[in-house]
Image (cartoon, rainbow, N blue to C red):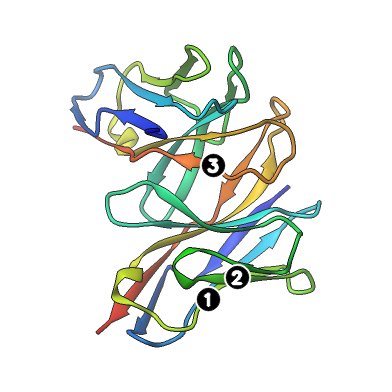
Amino acid sequence: AQSVTQLGSHVSVSEGALVLLRCNYSSSVPPYLFWYVQYPNQGLQLLLKYTSAATLVKGINGFEAEFKKSETSFHLTKPSAHMSDAAEYFCAVSVLYSGGGADGLTFGKGTHLIIQP
Amino acid sequence: NAGVTQTPKFQVLKTGQSMTLQCAQDMNHNSMYWYRQDPGMGLRLIYYSASEGTTDKGEVPNGYNVSRLNKREFSLRLESAAPSQTSVYFCASSPTTGWASYEQYFGPGTRLTVT
């Protein structure tokens, strides 16, 4: 079975500081991993995804994530936080549903990123 | 290209009332999904449809039914709404079925309150 755990339901950083959002996964097969962002009152938007092509993945808005198999982690980072980064962030892993042979995603519970001026 | 659209955006129901949430995508995707989002719970899958004509239960299907009307449209029905179904509902679509690395594309959500 595949699952993800996001450490920290809320993370607060100062504007200009490093952003680090943690995600650990569990998967019995080589995983595909995703980070999504949700701005207030909006749907989810893909930030980046890991598909085994490269362990360091660059996404939109200056975010990147590194896949570390030995640590079963896929942490999201951004060197310098901006006020516009304030949002909810979700880590997700591909899962093969037992019911119909379709694939999908299972999500972590989310991390709310707060940017202090 | 509108992506994934959902109607309505907001809805208030009384306990016991029924309603249908509509979802459509114009990306020619095979797979479609319904999730609910509750504070501190992340997104939980209600139902999914791997392809036109097929639907399957997800993690939290009780109290819901779905219809994959055609390749574009996937509706979610609450037959007898309960306060526990107060939530934000998201529809999503994905290009393919089978084990793959395709991401899901999300609609803007429907905020449902059941009193």
Q: Amino acid at mark 2?
A: Ala
Q: Amino acid at mark 1?
A: Thr
Q: Is residue A65 left or right of residue A72?
A: left
> What's the residue at 39%, 80% (across, down)?
A81
* Quarter of the figure that contains the C terminus of chain A: bottom left
Question: What mark, if any, has residue B92 been given in the picture?
Answer: none
Q: Secondary structure at mark 3?
A: loop
Q: Amino acid at mark 3?
A: Gln
Q: At which x and y percent is residue A78?
A: 49, 77
- Which quadrant holds residue B57? top right
Q: Are marks 1 and 2 in contact (CB under 8 Å)?
A: yes
Question: What mark, if any, has residue B104 been given in the picture?
Answer: 3
Q: Secondary structure at mark 1?
A: strand
> What's the residue at 46%, 85% (across, down)?
A18
How packed is label 3: few (under 14 Cα within 10 Å), some, or many (20 or more)? many
> What's the residue at 28%, 16% (across, down)?
B18
Q: At which x and y percent is residue A89?
A: 45, 62
- Which quadrant holds residue A100? top right
Given the image, what chain letter belongs to the residue carrying mark 3? B
**Residue A116 position (above or below residue A5):** below
In the rendered image, residues at marks 3 and 1 fall on the same chain: no
> What's the residue at 41%, 24% (across, down)?
B24
Which residue is label 2 attached to? A65
Q: Are marks 3 and 1 in contact (CB under 8 Å)?
A: no
Which residue is label 1 attached to? A77
Q: At which x and y percent is residue A19?
A: 46, 79
Question: Residues under labels 3 and 2: Cα distance?
Answer: 19 Å
Q: Is residue A51 left or right of residue A21?
A: right
